Amino acid sequence: RKEVEQDPGPFNVPEGATVAFNCTYSNSASQSFFWYRQDCRKEPKLLMSVYSSGNEDGRFTAQLNRASQYISLLIRDSKLSDSATYLCVPDSGAGSYQLTFGKGTKLSVIP
Amino acid sequence: DAEITQSPRHKITETGRQVTLACHQTWNHNNMFWYRQDLGHGLRLIHYSYGVQDTNKGEVSDGYSVSRSNTEDLPLTLESAASSQTSVYFCASSKGGSSYNEQFFGPGTRLTVL
């Protein structure tokens, strides 16, 4: 089983749509979770941190289900500027500062 | 503003040459990391450091080395560049401590080995 599994997409959605990305992780010892966005040929940028069951920041909502080892990211009212690749990133286990990066899900928001 | 920088941003070199990529952060973060990113792969960890004089190997460390002589810098050296090391290299840092694992990335270095 891969450490982090994400649907690679691409997800092509119209402006204003709601889109959800799913991610499963294999390390049951992971404690903290992150969503990063990465624009083409640029560095990953932190979008959200998830330490408990979920987090919400404006149009973005992340939910964590530790029992199922599943994380989701919901984007409401999609903007053209949301077009990017979204990386699901759990830490590598209790006491570890390392992160395990998924390959990402590509989102294209269409006018 | 505090930041993390990488230099050079682009580098072309020849097989067999030694190459050093610089990474500098002004956040006073304890932890620093080097990754490479290639098509079809996620970010893969090359080396990391949890403090001055501390260095550790990641999953793809062969052919690379790092040194940490101060808090701000973690240079990555390719001892004898190979074509397989053509990639985009990202440096990252994180605060460390009990619960701060967020990593912040530099802009990347595009390395081509001919």
Image (spheres, coloured by chain):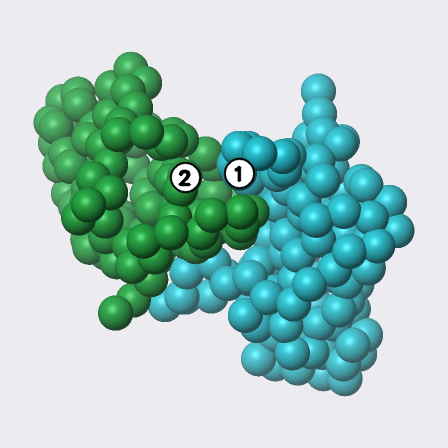
Shown in cyan, the chain is B
Tag 1 residue: B101
Residue B32 horizontal side relative to residue A110, left or right? right
Q: Position of residue A107 (x, y in %)?
A: 24, 42
Q: Which chain is green?
A: A
Q: Residue at x 55, y 61 (%)?
A: B45
Residue at far right of view: B69
Q: Is residue A111 visible?
A: no
Which secondary structure lies at badge 2?
A: loop
Q: Quadrant of residue B85?
A: bottom right
The reply to whether residue B62 is visible in this rendering is yes
Q: Is residue B46 above or below residue B103?
A: below
Amino acid marked by disc 1 = Asn
Quadrant for the N terminus of chain B, please: top right
Q: Nearer the viewer, residue B11 or B26?
A: B26
Assign a secondary structure to mark 1.
Answer: loop
For mark 1, does the 10 Å Cα neighbourhood hold few (<14), some (14 to 19), or many (20 or more) residues? many
Residue A74 location, x and y as percent? 19, 31
Image mark 2: chain: A
Q: Nearer the viewer, residue B111 or B3?
A: B3
